Image: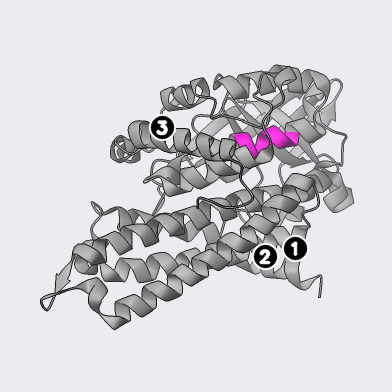
Amino acid sequence: MRNRAIYSSDHELFRDNVRRFFRTELEPNIEQWENDGVVPREFWRKAAENGFLCCGVPEEYGGPGADFLYNMVLSEETGYAIGGASVGFSVQADIVAYYLLNSANEDQKRYWLPRMVSGESIAAIGMTEPGCGSDLKALRTTAVRDGNEYVINGQKTFITNGQNCDFVLLACTTDPSKGAKGISMIIVETDRPGFERGRNLDKIGQKGADTSEMFFSDVRVPVTNLVGNEGDGFAIMMKELPRERITIACRAQAEAQRAFEMTVDYVKERKAFGHAVLDFQNTQFTLAELKTDLEVGWAYLDQCLKKIDEGTLTPEEGAMAKLWTTENEGKVVDKCLQFFGGYGYMREYPISRAFVDARVRRIYGGTSEIMKLVISRTL
């Protein structure tokens, strides 16, 4: 992960600070937080105090004004940390913050962005609905104009930060007759009458993440909560999704790297038939293959990071990065867990957490099948 040309010495110094923070504040507490089913807001505030929330928000909106690569260092280190898969910083910093920066009006930016930087406000993004999955054009949550307000009805599921969030950037239909061109993005504060948080979903992995259902029953918000113009929602999402997919790719790649490094350390110590497991040719060949695949992933990911920093990353390139890194992560963690034998199946071993946490990477942000569809359209 280090000594990559894409990052400067300042980026690497930032990496050291982030890694130290996660080692002291996250890893010792993750078991308790997984039992609780939520990462506490106090952790968010500590991260904010250290400058780890919304690094890319400009100074005029209360942020550090750092380049997007700082966000990606943070994403990588979140993935590298044991239990980092449960941390929802990425939705706040890499997704919602950029939706607002690129599409919101000045009043919306000045109100929400400083609060997101400070950790005072936690953001969620509401896309997925029951029965819709990755098909964003099939959204059924509606926002009907009534004078100076929108009246919102519908339901969302699998929403990261769902229990903690203070507002959700909601994808909904303002004109069902127009299909994708009738989708809009609206800020919905979670203290509004008619909004209800559903259950904190019981997942096989990422157990410290508050992934939730949301229900909207005649929720009224002012029309000034509209982000962009009516009907812009689908175009906004399509513009921002490559960034989200690169963020997921960074997390997946770093998680795979940590699993690999844990495994190398383990096979050096574990004995079988009087020898260290690393001494066996099968071990060496398998780990050599995994190391090669990891290096290939980092090389392509860095190409994409350079393009996203320049503003030239295409949707298919973002899709290819997500497809390769998440599918490869699944292979890496599976092969790594095998070297731990029965201990790899025990929850007390971090490799087991890495195994179950990795599985969702091939699903959210667009499934692997959707990534292939995006790529195939360019053939």
- Whether residue 285 is in magenta: the answer is no
In terms of depth relative to the viewer, which is nearer, 20 or 192? 20
- Whether tag 1 and tag 3 are in contact, CB under 8 A, the answer is no
Q: Which of the image's four quarters has the C terminus?
A: bottom right
Residue at 33% in and 76% down = 284
In front of the other: 291 or 228: 291
Membership of 94 in magenta stretch: yes
Q: Which residue is mark 3?
A: 21
Whether residue 154 is visible, yes or no, is no
Q: Which secondary structure class fits the magenta region best?
A: helix
Q: Label 1 sits on what residue type?
A: Glu
Q: Which comes sooner in the sequence, label 1 or label 3?
A: 3
Give the residues in magenta. Answer: 93-99
Element type at mark 1:
helix
Q: Is residue 120 above or below residue 232?
A: above
Circle on res. 316 = 1
Lower sequence index among marks 2 and 3: 3
Q: Secondary structure at mark 2?
A: helix
Which residue is tagged 2?
320
Residue density around tag 3, few if under 14, some if 14–19, many if 20 or more, within 10 Å: some
Residue 358: percent from left, percent from top: 45, 58
Horizontally, residue 222 falls left or right of residue 354, namely: right
